[in-house]
Image (tube, rainbow, N blue to C red):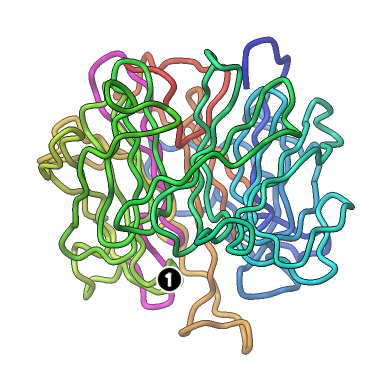
Amino acid sequence: MRRGRTRHVIVAVLAMTLLALAPAAPAGAIHDVDPRTKNLHPMGHIEEPASLLNPDQGSWLGFNIRDISAPGNPKHVSSTVCEGNQGDVIVWDTILVRSWNSPAALGAMCDGVAVPAGFEGLHIFDISDLEDPALVGSVDLSTGAILGRCGSHTATGVPDAANNRLLVYNSGSGCDGIDIVEVPLGNPAGATYLRTEVVGRACHDTAVILGDAMLAACAGGDGYAMWTLTGSGTLENPDLLYERAIDGVGIGHAASFTWDGEVFAFGHEPGGGVQANCQASNLDSDKSAFFFDALTGEQLGTWVLPRDQSATENCTIHNFNVVPLRSGRDVMVVGNYQAGTWVVDFTDPENPQTLAWSDPPPAPVPPPPFDFLGLDIVGAWSSYWYNNFIYETNIGEGLNVFRFSGKETAGALQLDHLNPQTQEFTL
């Protein structure tokens, strides 16, 4: 969010957090007792245990807003119910955009408003009142509305101040490329679909870096696509630079850039995030982050998760971002389901170094029908750096906050807002 807000908030998808009647977390599940390195310090916590397998716990029913002004004591502010699954969110000033991934069932509701049967796409909220967000609009991206579209699995915000609007780069489930949606800042209820940028892969996450770099990249399928947003490309009409397949990759998932825009970081999701793919017996490519020259696609190196996981722990290199540092050092924070949260220095992408980690013990396997391949689907869905703290959304525990005390992140920039997939400037 922009300057002028008196408290910092974090918005999270309910799927990774709570229902009010969820049972207490099992003993030893809270982050202050998980195995970890000494330089990663547990801070605050909001206990909201869940499971993607158990409908009495996990759900995709909307989003939470939390006050993180005091990272050692985060507080719940509000919950908004919106029934569509996945529920990726973007926040810009007083506007929140939320993904709805699958066709709406008859009778589905969002913030108390009936959703047309078959709807897939984006909902637009006014969050001027953080305690009572209000639905103000929607954009239907279903196949019935726009030929070939298939809802919204993830979405990335692209601010376009020159035109007083927020653009959304939208990724559907299984549709090639990205949809581009316009949200007028003066009239968010008037959000509209503009066009689709088609490439040869179904995009999962799209990362954007503005400033001097002006690049966008989508992770999906067997690799990624890279666009330029300047010169022959614009924010509304990106120009494809290249596409790249990666050996050992089948489900491209996550994307980010170094803050100079020179290196692209990529993660994928073998087993769809619901299998134990970080065991000693797994291929290195199953448990790796990949680093590429952003302009050429040349592979520069990989980081392989160095701590083997058990046969009962779902694990991939899942969601991450890069710490904003003027030092020229490149440090990423990444959440890996049951492998927990990791801090990695990839300043030398050929020789990345693990700096810190918090890795919980395997979660107890629930009884049928809530087990899946002998495991539970819990763990660190995403871990992001923001203003010298790490915020981990842990499916089985809730919101966990850490402080990393290593010198490698000394002098990190303080930001007044952050959407992790959108880097609004270069360093």
Looking at the rendering, in which quadrant would you find the C terminus? Answer: top left
Res. 42 in view = no
Q: Position of residue 209 (x, y in %)?
A: 37, 27
Question: In the visual, does 342 lie left or right of 95?
Answer: left
On the image, which quarter does residue 261 sit in?
A: top left
Of 112 and 299, which appears nearest the observer? 112
Residue at 56% x, 83% y is: 371
Of 233 and 338, which appears nearest the observer? 233
- Residue 317 forms part of the magenta stretch: yes
Looking at the rendering, in which quadrant would you find the N terminus? Answer: top right
- Residue 379 forms part of the magenta stretch: no
Which residues lie in the magenta part? 309-338
Res. 105 in view = yes
Question: In the visual, does 52 lie left or right of 266?
Answer: right
Mark 1 surroundings within 10 Å by alpha-carbon count, few (fewer than 14), some (14 through 19), many (20 or more):
many
Question: Residue at label 1?
Answer: 313
Residue at 72% x, 36% y is: 66
List the single residue furthest toward the right: 112
Q: Position of residue 121 (x, y in %)?
A: 63, 53
Question: In the visual, does 228 lie left or right of 245?
Answer: right
Task: Please state which amino acid type lies under the numbered disc 1.
Answer: Glu
Secondary structure predominantly adopted by residues drawn in magenta: loop
Q: Position of residue 418 (x, y in %)?
A: 53, 27
Residue at 26% x, 15% y is: 327
Q: Is disc 1 placed on a helix, strand or loop?
A: loop
Q: Position of residue 142 (x, y in %)?
A: 61, 60
List the single residue furthest toward the bottom: 368
